[in-house]
Amino acid sequence: MSRVVEVQKASELRRDLCGKPREVVVTAASDLDAILQGGLRVGSLTEICGASGSGRTQITLQLAANVQLPRVLGGLDASCLYIDTRGALYANRYVEVIAGLRARLSGLATSQGSVTPQMREMLTTQANKSIDAFLEGTYHYAAPSVAHVVSLVASLPTLLDGCGNVRLVILNSLDPDAFPKDTRTAVLTSITRALRELATSRNIAILVVTTMRQYGGSFLAPCDQWSSALQQRVLLRGFGGDPRGATTQEGTAIFRILQEGIVNDRT
């Protein structure tokens, strides 16, 4: 039996793609979301690169909480898998971010603005969600060595099958310098291609955190062994103090990190 192959013009394909709203997870800072084209994209592999103190981990904690919100509030009504290579998922700080998110939602629910009764009810429900409920929606896995990272990436499909409705995977962080030089390019390429394929096949968002190194008086992004697999790269600047900046191909956003989480810079 011969196969029937459907032929579609590129212009028709483009209209189809443009007509389908892309799912995203918002960061809670609208300026940062704007240069991410709405937020962290589902079905894509994104890299956040910055030096120590630039806000990389704070953004990951915010996203881990936000993904659990309903879609209408910028989440995916789903869970997060947080792969931690350096003990970066600080429980106390994560609790602060969650508490800050609940406070923001409560403020919106009680505001005098033009909020529909249905939206006000949803905001109130999410604001009343317990901190423990948010914590239960975050699966934490430690991967303290290169061998752990390679093994975990290879077993991610099985791992995801055992978790509940994960739509966001965060790898914090991937350090190219930790890999043996003779196999670095091959292993990094294999990891990032596997992550991109997983993001596409599972229709999830995958975020990889990398470190910007200092060479002389300049900070440089890590070498591009994985650049061909990336669909989005965010470069952070600001080294331990506010305001901080984030740059993508879409532009630059300035943000601050407060106790309650990430906010726009309005100074």
Image: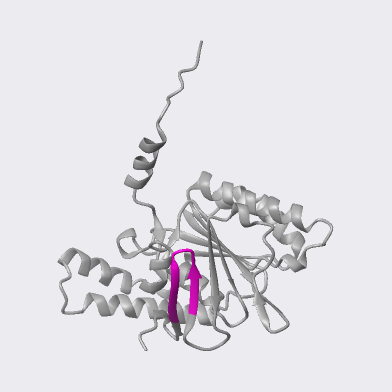
Q: Which quadrant of the figure has residue 15?
A: top left
Position of 263 with respect to 136 (left or right) is: left
Residue drawn at point x = 21 percent, y = 70 percent? 120
Q: Position of residue 27 (x, y in %)?
A: 42, 70
Q: Nearer the viewer, residue 82 or 9?
A: 9
Residue drawn at point x = 41 percent, y = 83 percent? 260
What is the basis of the colouring in this image? one colour
Q: Which quadrant of the figure has residue 72?
A: bottom left
Q: Nearer the viewer, residue 144 or 178?
A: 178
Q: Is residue 130 above or below residue 4?
A: below
Q: Position of residue 10 (x, y in %)?
A: 41, 36
Q: Is residue 45 above or below residue 219?
A: above
Instruction: Based on the picture, tell me whether residue 247 belongs to the magenta stretch.
Output: yes
User: What's drawn in magenta, residue-wise?
Assistant: 245-255
- The quarter of the rendered structure image containing the C terminus is bottom left
Residue drawn at point x = 43 percent, y = 80 percent? 255
Q: Position of residue 146 (x, y in %)?
A: 75, 63
